[in-house]
């Protein structure tokens, strides 16, 4: 992409949980923005969003919204991305898409900057941001795969409600208040009460019995690590936590592996923070990772049931590194001199 001092940026889905984070992170990281367009549905026209000390008037996302835009960050769902991203690219901008719309298209790079920045290439049209559960897992898996070659991964997730958007955040808050006040808790976003509960169900079920979220973790991980021989067995679970996803991960490798070496290996990696002092009750927690850039790893231990295998616990803010920050890091990669 043509290098400039400042770039015209659009955020499609700017009023959503991810879109608002994108504005916050572009501002915090001083992304060189000339002009920022906040785009959402017609329902939000008239709203204003704060950015760099100014108030941005939300505009309706339309076919001609991307004229003169250099970089567009999309987080308005796969349908909106399918409808508008190709036209945005035609009008000359690079689209960084947070939805699943194009992730598995062979010609679309699926990127986590700490893991596979080179996948971006020189002339990307659309760059896909992986699913949040995939992002935090591959950041931890990449150094392990490079050193030991991963054969198999068994992962269970504990995903916060913010992964389902603003309405789900409100639902957990309202249900919790109602239940504590002795009132009924009506489910709306989820098929069951989420307060004081765990739902082993994220996204739709497929004929295989797995959910779409689970298969995103399988397919996206293989694509990002460039290795379709890695076998992955996921179970994704929604838990009554507002922000940050946690994951229990078991990794089996081709050759010998041990917890001590992995602790040292991960401690030196960009984007990873090892928190692993169980003797003083120190391990990664959802509440500590809120708003943080890093992927936190702890409880690293040898698998007592299997040779060449280890267990660990990974936590990261799903709206931050799992969505908005990863997208902004991709934008930073595009504009930095190479
Ligand atoms: P959200 O809080 O429900 O926000 C949805 C956003 O999309 C709002 O800004 C909404 O605008 C906008 N939108 C919806 N329909 C639109 C339309 N027809 N035209 C223009 N804008 C439209 O959801 P969210 O949590 O921010 O997530 C948004 C999307 O980001 C998800 O659907 C998903 O594809 C992606 N996402 C990715 C990850 C990840 O794992 N990387 C994580 C979470 C989300 P209004 O306010 O005007 O309705
Ligand atoms: O549920 C979560 O914790 C993550 C949700 C991600 C999500 C939600 C709605 C639609 C996605 C995604 O990023 O895969 C999508 C989608 O774009 O398909």
Image (cartoon, rainbow, N blue to C red):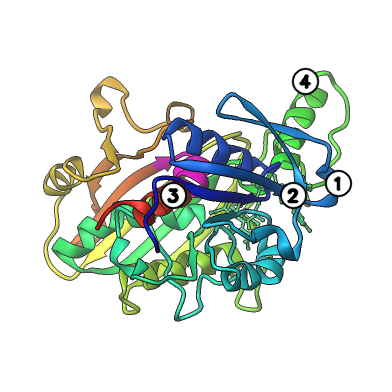
Query: Image quadrant of residue 91?
Result: bottom right
Ligand 1 closer than 8 Å to label 2 CB: yes
Ligand 1 closer than 8 Å to label 3 CB: yes
Q: Nearer the viewer, mark 4 or mark 2?
A: 2
Q: Is residue 116 or residue 63 the one in the foreground?
A: 63
Q: Residue 331 lies in magenta, yes or no?
A: no
Q: What residue does disc 2 label?
A: 40
Give the magenta part as a residue range: 315-325
Ligand 1 closer than 8 Å to label 1 CB: yes
Q: What residue does disc 1 label?
A: 43
219 shown above or below 164: below
- Label 2 Cα crowd, 10 Å radius (few <14 / some 14-19 / many 20+): many
Real-space Cα separation, disc 1 to disc 4, in angstroms: 33 Å
Q: Earlier in the sequence, mark 4 or mark 2?
A: 2
Q: Residue at x 11, y 62 (%)?
A: 256
Q: Nearer the viewer, mark 4 or mark 3?
A: 3
Q: Secondary structure at mark 4?
A: helix
Ligand 2 closer than 8 Å to label 4 CB: no
Q: On the picture, is 231 further left or further right than 108?
A: left
Q: Earlier in the sequence, mark 2 or mark 3?
A: 2
Q: Is residue 336 or residue 139 the one in the foreground?
A: 336
- Label 4 Cα crowd, 10 Å radius (few <14 / some 14-19 / many 20+): few
Q: What residue does disc 3 label?
A: 326
Real-space Cα separation, disc 2 to disc 1, in angstroms: 8 Å
Q: What residue does disc 4 label?
A: 180
Q: Is residue 84 or residue 317 the one in the foreground?
A: 84
């Amino acid at each position: 992409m043509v290098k400039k001092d400042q770039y015209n940026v659009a955020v499609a889905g700017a009023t959503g949980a991810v879109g608002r984070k994108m504005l916050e992170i572009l501002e915090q990281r001083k992304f060189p923005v000339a002009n920022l367009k906040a785009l959402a549905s017609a329902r939000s026209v008239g709203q204003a969003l704060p950015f760099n000390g100014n108030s941005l008037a939300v505009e309706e996302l339309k076919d001609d919204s991307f004229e003169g835009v250099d970089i567009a960050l999309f987080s308005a769902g796969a349908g909106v991305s399918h409808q508008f991203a190709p036209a945005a690219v035609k009008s000359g901008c690079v689209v960084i898409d947070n939805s699943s719309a194009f992730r598995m298209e062979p010609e679309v790079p699926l990127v986590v900057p700490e893991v596979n920045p080179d996948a971006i290439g020189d002339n990307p049209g659309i760059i896909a941001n992986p699913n949040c559960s995939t992002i935090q897992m591959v950041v931890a898996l990449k150094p392990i795969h490079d050193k030991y070659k991963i054969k198999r991964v068994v992962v269970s997730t504990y995903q916060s409600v913010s992964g389902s958007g603003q309405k789900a955040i409100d639902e957990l808050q309202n249900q919790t208040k109602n239940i504590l006040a002795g009132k009924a808790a009506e489910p709306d976003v989820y098929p069951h009460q989420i307060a004081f509960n765990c739902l082993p169900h994220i996204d739709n079920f497929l004929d295989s019995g797995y959910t779409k979220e689970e298969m995103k973790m399988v397919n996206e991980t293989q694509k990002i690590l460039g290795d379709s021989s890695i076998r992955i067995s996921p179970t994704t679970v929604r838990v009554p936590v507002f922000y940050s996803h946690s994951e229990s991960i078991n990794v089996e490798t081709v050759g010998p592996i041990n917890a001590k070496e992995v602790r040292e290996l991960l401690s030196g990696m960009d984007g990873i923070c090892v928190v692993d002092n169980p003797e003083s009750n120190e391990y990664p927690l959802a509440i500590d990772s809120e708003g943080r850039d890093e992927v936190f790893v702890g409880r690293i231990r040898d698998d007592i049931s299997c040779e060449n295998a280890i267990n660990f616990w990974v936590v990261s803010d799903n709206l931050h590194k799992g969505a908005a920050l990863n997208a902004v890091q991709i934008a930073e990669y595009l504009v930095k001199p190479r």
